[in-house]
Image (tube, rainbow, N blue to C red):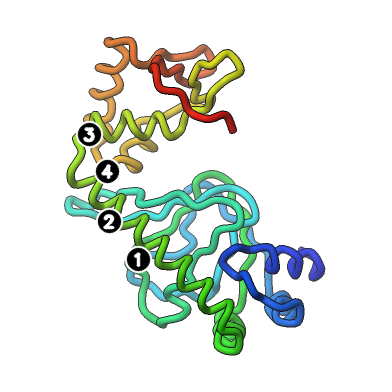
Amino acid sequence: MHKPDAIALLMRLPMLTGLTESQAEVLADTAQKKSFKNGESLVSAGGLTESFFVILSGRANVMLQSSGDKAIALATLGIGECIGEMSVLDAQPHCASVVADGPLQVLLLNPQTFVSVIQENPKVAGTLLKAMARHLARANRQIVWLSTISVQGRVARTLMDMALQADNGELHIKTKVTHVVLAKRVGATREMVGKALKDFQAKGFIEKTPTGGLRINDRRKKPRH
């Protein structure tokens, strides 16, 4: 990524609101662009971050290892979101892993430079702390959700979250929905997810489309994106 583009990107990030152009330039001096393949790990639970990541394109899943060696997706991060900021700031190992969900491109920032910029700019530090608090709250809500709602309820809600409303008002998930992906997102086995999907299909809640996606038959509608 060209330096002017990196500077412009850094100054647009909500997590770094208040960053001055000179500080963005300092960060951009050491920034590098890196690509990850689907399933590749950016950071691993128990490890330390060597870089601070900003997602340029694609998505990444925050994964937590549960009992029985089962991975649960706590959150999905998209363009403009950051990875590794907590470990960089407190120099402690990660409590979760972050894995590429399809092709992914990120901007790597030098952790020492990042910490130096945060220390000299209270406004950026305050914005960053608020963003980190929101991320922790989201993770806590996800953990509570996983522990209190049935597998069928979690699958139903996840499908609704994935769906987009078409011009005719129908809800569609255009891409193929695999049992593996759903199992990770809802914290269940593939067999349990498969059973829930079969039940939904039998009741007419979902229908498979020729492209491998799903049509959701539900009276509730999502806003168009």
Assess disc 2: are there few (<14), some (14-19) or many (≥20) residues with their C-alpha within 10 Å of its C-alpha.
some
Under circle 2, the secondary element is strand
Q: Which residue is mark 2?
A: 65
Q: On the image, numbered disc 4 is attached to which residue?
A: 187
Q: Residues under labels 2 and 1: Cα distance?
A: 8 Å
Among the 4 quarters of the image, the one containing residue 32: bottom right
Residue 140: quadrant of the picture:
bottom left
Quadrant for the C terminus, please: top right
State the image coordinates of residue 199 (x, y, percent, origin top left).
Answer: 25, 17
- As helix, strand or loop, the secondary structure at mark 3 comes to helix
**40 sits left or right of 104 in the view:** left
The three-letter code of the residue at mark 4 reads Gly
* Kind of residue at badge 3: Val
Q: Nearer the viewer, mark 3 or mark 2?
A: 3
Disc 2 vs disc 1: Cβ atoms closer than 8 Å? yes
Residue 171 point in image, percent of width and height = 48, 20
Q: Where is 36 relative to 162, above or below? A: below
Marked residue nearer the N-terminal end (4 or 1): 1
Which residue is the site of mark 3?
A: 151
Pointer 1 residue: 45
Residue at screen point 52% across, 12% down = 210
Residue in the foreground of this view, choosing between 109 and 82: 82
Secondary structure, mark 4, is loop
